[in-house]
Amino acid sequence: MKLKPPPTSSSSSQTLTATAASSHDAKLLVRETLRISADLASAPSVPSVGSLPENASFGVVDRQFVDSSLRLLCCEEIDGRRWKYFADESVGSEQLKLKKKKKNAIRAVSLHSPQAPAEEFMAFIRSYVVPEGFPDSVTPSYVPYMTWRALKHFFGGAMGVFTTQTLLNSVGVSKHRTTPGAVAINWILKDGAGRVGKMLYARQGKKFDYDLKQLRFAGDLLMELGAGVELVTAVVPQFFLPLACAANVAKNVGAVTSTSTRTPIYKAFAKGENIGDVTAKGECVGNLADLLGTGLSILISKRNPSLVKTFAFLSFGYVFSSYREVKSVVLHTLNRARFTVAVESFLRTGRVPTLQDGNSREDIFNFPWRQHRPIVLGPRFKEAFQDPNSYLAVKPIFEKEHYIVTYNPSKENIYVLLKDQAKSDDVLKAAFHGHVLLHIIRSSTNKQSSSRKQHEDELSASLLSTADLQAHVAESYKMVSALYMPFKSKAKEQGWVMSESLLNPGRARLCEMAT
């Protein structure tokens, strides 16, 4: 066997050089691999195209842009929909080549799947009929109020078609002997009478704040009354002008009431500074319902339905919806009706009703023009006292107060007279005292007249002498001193705004005599 000769020095050096070069390349390869791995680990994760669901939507971004060249910048939310913004790093390296590519340096990716057409349509409708941030931006009573309001406007729009059709037929019945100019004059006079009635009724002013719900419902009743009178013109067209004028006066008075009470109601629904948004969306709901009612009524009118039956059905729907609409309003303020509910509940049970309970128990049919009221706040002196002795008997009891409370048996009313020094809290306390005295007299009268069946509000003059009156007033004064502050405290705990601004006291004040 022949042995190979040992390598020469020159060949040995070449082999060592090659080995060293291979070792250096391997080190560079390992180092580069580690660097790439570290970059990938530190970079934000971006979903790859293959890992995304097939139904994913990228909005303005195509699937070809969602790759490893995009770097997450931030996340954004608009109306419950989320978006991610990425930076296209490939653009940065080519800025010098194509400057116009700079506008594509930020990519937007939607994180939501496309909505169905029905959902998109409902979202569009909601943007017009509900305030922003709903339901957190409004009170819970907003939904029932708007539901009944929409239903009321639906019946109102339907009724408008029949009344307008009737008026046009009535004014044109005798057109063979009346010129078109005379017809136009009749129509203008009808509208003019309505505007005059609107201006005259607007002088009520502050009453729209005192008895908001009662006047709102009364205005809707006047609207239906006006619609009924307009339909009567079909039976007696020769009396078109007087009937149409009367109907338009009633409807315009109702319109003034609706407009005047709108802002306080919407203000009660707004939780923040969004009363403008709440008002706009509320009016949009009313107009939309009105259009739907008008369209349906046009279709029905082509079949010539019975005018009486149609009016009865639509009128009942309108009035009932109006009543439920007003009852659903929850106000925080205390007018005379809600104050009566709160005080009477406190005197009977020791508890003040909640806002919801107090508003639901408010009497909507207690219209402000009713003459008989059990408690008169701020009357004239001659209305409260029937003789000097009755005044002199109770005057010493109220020396330290800024009011005087008495009962006039001949008129069966409690009278609360205010002194000129009376402030806001004094008026509130005086009204509370009036209810306490009424409660005492009713209890005493019911005991003495147990042998006779007598209505709760009847206070017989024969059962109350001057001495009895003085005793009852003194007893009421002690009760008020002990109960007024607890009543105020419990009312504030329930959320009631304790202010006399809506109690509507009379303007008469007792003043000190000059010496």
Image (cartoon, rainbow, N blue to C red):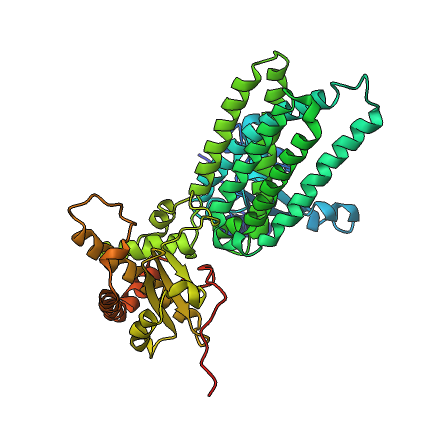
Which percent across, then down, holds residue 83? 56, 43
Which percent across, then down, holds residue 329? 44, 45
- Looking at the image, can residue 18 be seen? no
State the image quarter where residue 496 is shown.
bottom left
- Looking at the image, can residue 379 be seen? yes
Left or right of 492: which side holds 62? right
The residue under the point 43% across, 66% down is 382
The answer to whether residue 449 is above or below residue 426 is above
The residue under the point 45% across, 37% down is 323
Left or right of 385: which side holds 135? right
Q: Residue furthest bottom?
A: 515
Residue situated in front as seen by the camera: 267 or 79:
267
Which percent across, then down, holds residue 65? 63, 38
The answer to whether residue 86 is above or below residue 48 is below
The residue under the point 52% across, 39% down is 47
State the image quarter where residue 364 is shown.
top left
Which percent across, then down, holds residue 273? 54, 56
Tally of numbered discs: 0
Residue situated in front as seen by the camera: 304 or 294:
304
Q: Quadrant of the N terminus?
A: top left
